[in-house]
Amino acid sequence: MIDRAVLATLIVVFLHAMPAQAQSSRTWVSGVGDDANPCSRTAPCKTFAGAISKTATSGEINCLDPGGFGAVTITKSLSIVCAHTEGGVLAAGTNGVIVNVGTNDKVLLEGLDIEGFGTGLNGVRMVGAGKLTIRKCSIRNFTAGTGFGVDIQGSAGARVFLEDNLIIGNLGGINVKGAAGAANNAFLTHSLVDANTNFVLQVDGASVVAVTASTLTGSPAAIITTNGGSFISFGGNLLRGTGAPTQTLPLL
């Protein structure tokens, strides 16, 4: 018969040897999910925040069916893709999505409906040093605090690519101001930025924004560049409001 003390020791050793629950490269959220679930397709989570801890670095979170999946902070390479169903983020009184990642990290947000409900702070806020892509998203009604649809305040080298987005009804459309004056870069294409209270696009400091095939309208100021900020326009933009590009290039 095994001594009880020896048996207890074996159990402890066995438990310590067991691997932690593995993260998945693809996880799922559902409007009727539960964050206690493993976020698999057959047992999805309820929120983006709940799914992130169960998603491996460079993994992807998908929306299984329509739902409101909550505000989220992203701190690693990750994709959130809800291209074929409603991926709602209701961010009353807070930021919709905060991206705070390292230099070599990449984040993709695609197909999200980010709603500030008139009290949201910022729709998407970039404060890291990596690369962020925002595609086919609607970002609306962030009118509290700074109230930017997209706020880019990354550290040196941060890059943000915006394609086919609708950014409307915020205090400011897109704000680019690198942290402590750091140079950030943004590229905007095939997007509508309209009816934002104060400005369409603001570039402050050493940052550079390039815009093509986009409509920038419905605000008193279309473009604000301060402290050396650069706005490069090329390829069929429609601009309405005060301000002008610092450089205009032909589309090759």
Image (cartoon, rainbow, N blue to C red):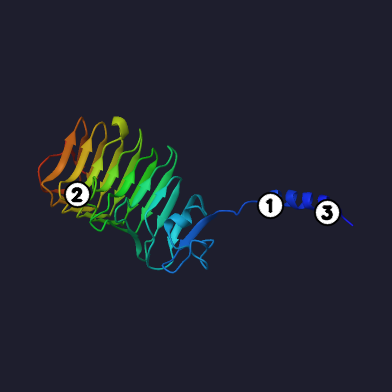
Neighbor class of circle 1 (other Cα within 10 Å; few <14, some 14-19, many 20+) is: few
Is residue 252 visible from the viewing direction of this image?
A: no
The residue tagged with tag 3: helix, strand or loop? helix
Residue type at numbered disc 1: Met
Q: Residue 171 has which mark?
A: 2
Neighbor class of circle 2 (other Cα within 10 Å; few <14, some 14-19, many 20+) is: many
In this rendering, position of residue 85 left or right of residue 212: right
Q: Residue 216 has which mark?
A: none
Give above or below for 77 relative to 39.
above
**Picture quadrant of residue 211:** top left
The quarter in which the N terminus is drawn is bottom right
The image position of residue 14, as x and y in percent, is 74, 51
Image depth: mark 1 or mark 3 in front: 3
The residue tagged with tag 1: helix, strand or loop? loop
- According to the image, label 3 marks what residue? 4
**Picture quadrant of residue 129:** top left
The image position of residue 134, as x and y in percent, is 33, 51
Give above or below for 54 relative to 68.
above
Please report whichever mark, 1 or 2, sits nearer to the chain's N-terminal start: 1
Please report whichever mark, 2 or 3, sits nearer to the chain's N-terminal start: 3
The residue tagged with tag 2: helix, strand or loop? loop
Whether residues under marks 1 and 3 lie with C-beta atoms below 8 angstroms apart, the answer is no
Asked whether 247 or 223 is in front, the reply is: 223
The quarter in which the C terminus is drawn is top left
**Exactly how many numbered labels are in the figure?**
3
**What residue do we see at 65% from left, 51% from top?**
19
The image position of residue 224, as x and y in percent, is 16, 39
- According to the image, label 1 marks what residue? 18
Residue type at numbered disc 3: Arg
Q: CA distance from mark 1 to mark 2?
A: 51 Å
Residue type at numbered disc 2: Leu
The image position of residue 138, as x and y in percent, is 28, 57
